[in-house]
């Protein structure tokens, strides 16, 4: 069974938070890291994986992504701090 990932990316200065989801996170994060300036993540250099969670079902990942996207910044930061207090790039863990 494939896992589905919900993740949060940020930029070098942690000024931007981007929430996404993927069932192929290694490929998706690599795409973010190689993004062109035409995309949101490319324009703001958002390529540092600071949070992720998994679920077995795609519907759950969609629901969770939408939920986190609606959250205010403080809630997102708390989620990140609980898993990754130093805000290290976690892309090697995938």
Image (spheres, helix red, strand yellow):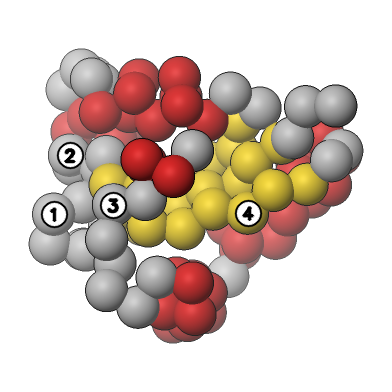
Is tag 3's residue or tag 1's residue first in the polypeptide sequence? 1
- Check disc 2 and report the residue beneath it: 45
Could you say whether the residue bearing mark 4 is in a helix, strand or loop? strand
Callout 4–callout 2 Cβ contact below 8 Å: no
Q: Marks 4/2: CA distance?
A: 22 Å
Could you say whether the residue bearing mark 3 is in a helix, strand or loop? loop
The mark lying in front, picked from 4 and 2, is 4
Q: Marks 3/4: CA distance?
A: 14 Å
Is residue 61 something that shows in the picture? yes
Q: Residue 41 in the image: x percent, y percent?
A: 29, 35
- Check disc 4 and report the residue beneath it: 53
Compared across the picture, whether 53 is left or right of 25 comes to right
Residue under the image location 46 percent in, 27 percent down: 26
Is tag 3's residue or tag 4's residue first in the polypeptide sequence? 4
Q: Residue furthest front?
A: 93
Residue 12 - label: 1
Q: Residue 78 in the image: x percent, y percent?
A: 47, 81
Is tag 4's residue or tag 1's residue first in the polypeptide sequence? 1
Q: Residue furthest left?
A: 13
Is tag 4's residue or tag 2's residue first in the polypeptide sequence? 2
């Amino acid at each position: 069974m494939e896992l589905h990932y919900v993740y949060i990316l940020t930029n070098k200065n942690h000024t931007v938070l981007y929430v996404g989801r993927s069932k192929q996170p290694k490929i998706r994060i690599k795409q973010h890291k190689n993004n062109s300036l035409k995309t949101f993540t490319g324009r703001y250099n958002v390529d540092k994986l600071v949070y992720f969670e998994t679920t077995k079902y795609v519907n759950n990942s969609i629901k969770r992504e939408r939920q986190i996207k609606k959250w205010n910044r403080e809630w997102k930061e708390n989620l990140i701090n609980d898993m990754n207090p130093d805000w290290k790039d976690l892309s090697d863990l995938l």
